[in-house]
Image: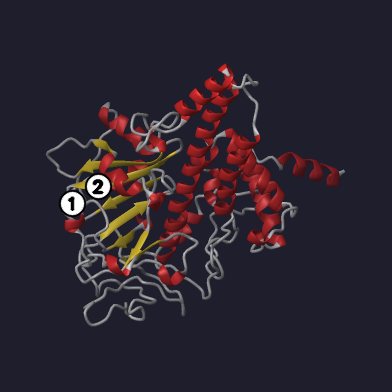
Amino acid sequence: MLRSLLVLTMLLVARPCFGQLDHEQEPINYSNEKPTDPVARLAARLEAGEIKLDWEPKHGYLTSLMRHLDVPASSQTLVFSKTSLQISRITPRTPRAIYFNDDVYLGWVQRGDVVEISAADPQLGGTFYTLTQHHDEPALIQRENARCLQCHGSTHTRRVPGHIVRSVFSDPGGQPIYRLGTHLTDDTSPFAERWGGWYVTGTHGKQRHMGNCVIADENVSEKLNVEAGANLTDLSGHFNVKPYLTVHSDIVALMVLEHQAMMHNVLTAANHSGRITARDAIIMNKALERPEDFESESTARRYASAAESVVKALLFCESPPLTDVVKGSSTFQEEFSARGPLDSKGRSLRQIDLETRLFKYPCSFLITSDSFQQLPVGVKTRVWQRLDEILSGKDTSEKFSHLSAEDRTTVREILTDVCPEAPFRTATAVKQSSETK
């Protein structure tokens, strides 16, 4: 009886308090933990006076911030819907510019009070900041929590702090017409549902998207003129492009942005789930007087579930194929692909395809990111186990049928070279050694 009471007490302690989000509890402690992402590190250096940001009249601190964070101008995408912090300054004539690299996202608007910043923290998930744009104020980066998490910590982001790419029906002023619905978009979204409220430059053949157009008069028609917004390579007819760092809102950058934002959210959800699972396992093992490292069937299932979501996202399991060739308008594709890492044959998970799918090799480049590397052991071990089963051909189930035998072999070879922890490295090395003999 005493043991049963103890178990019950422990379980009640482990359960979340009503109304408190999982990421605000132990062991996540989102709001109270200190972030370690690149923006947090830069903010600390600024506060300590180790570096300073340079201000210029046209863009404020933006370009200096981009240099320090290694965010390329070619990543520019432009969104004209009023769906962010500084909505009063965003219209189809003055779109908001988004710049990004693997870990950081920056939002800039003309004459804005701040640069909006978010990052992918390996342990916390999406972290949010603002940088003042006023020359007479110190260039300090401040962390934002409450007002950002109203949207960026909801069902839109798998209930973890994360990032959102949304497609809306926009009126001529950039106001979303919410009664017509919205689409959260990522690499699994139908092409036809993407980029409403965004500008899109580049060509895509007969495929159609929602970008580059608004509903002029919803009383007359509730349909977007998608033909008018198709295969656009010049935005100068829509607004004055001179205030922006480039004249593009590259379609390839948009497609990478969608995949990356979703992948970061999946990794965060798996990280938090894995850490909470480990916490609960410790409590239960102690209550039931089991060895500290004992793994119950329940614990194993929870780890496996989190791992499977990561595997499906890494391998683009639900991504619809392109039905026509896509071509970007800027240097983004070349610059993105050049970042590597390369395997021994010069191949990279960053290489772009654009004929039938986004990437040439169907495994996310974020498998080499800190967010993946810092997944809890219980989750990451199972991710590698599943990748081994799938890429070796042991698992040929329907959800992985989009992977050809060549895809599986090539991805396995690339991961063997670029991921030192890949568990099939040893087996591959042994096989190669045997063949050499």
Q: CA distance from mark 1 to mark 2?
A: 7 Å
How dense is the environment of label 2, judged by Cα within 10 Å: few (below 14), some, or many (20 and up)? many
Amino acid carrying mark 1 in the image: Gly
- Left or right of 268 on screen, residue 137: left
Q: In which quadrant is the N terminus drawn?
A: top right
**Which residue is at the front of the view, 371 or 436?**
371
Is label 1 in a helix, a strand or a loop? loop
- Is 243 located above or below residue 64 in the figure? below
Residue 125: x and y in percent read 42, 40
Task: Identify the residue position indicated by label 2 in the image.
Answer: 115
In this rendering, does residue 146 appear at all? yes
Residues at discs 1 and 2 in contact (Cβ within 8 Å)? yes
Residue 7: x and y in percent read 54, 24
Q: Name the residue at 61% across, 37% down.
A: 298
User: Extreme right residue here?
Assistant: 437
Task: Identify the residue position indicated by label 1 in the image.
Answer: 112
Q: Name the residue at 42% across, 44% down.
A: 103
- Left or right of 123 on screen, residue 71: left
Q: Name the residue at 73% across, 52% down.
A: 392
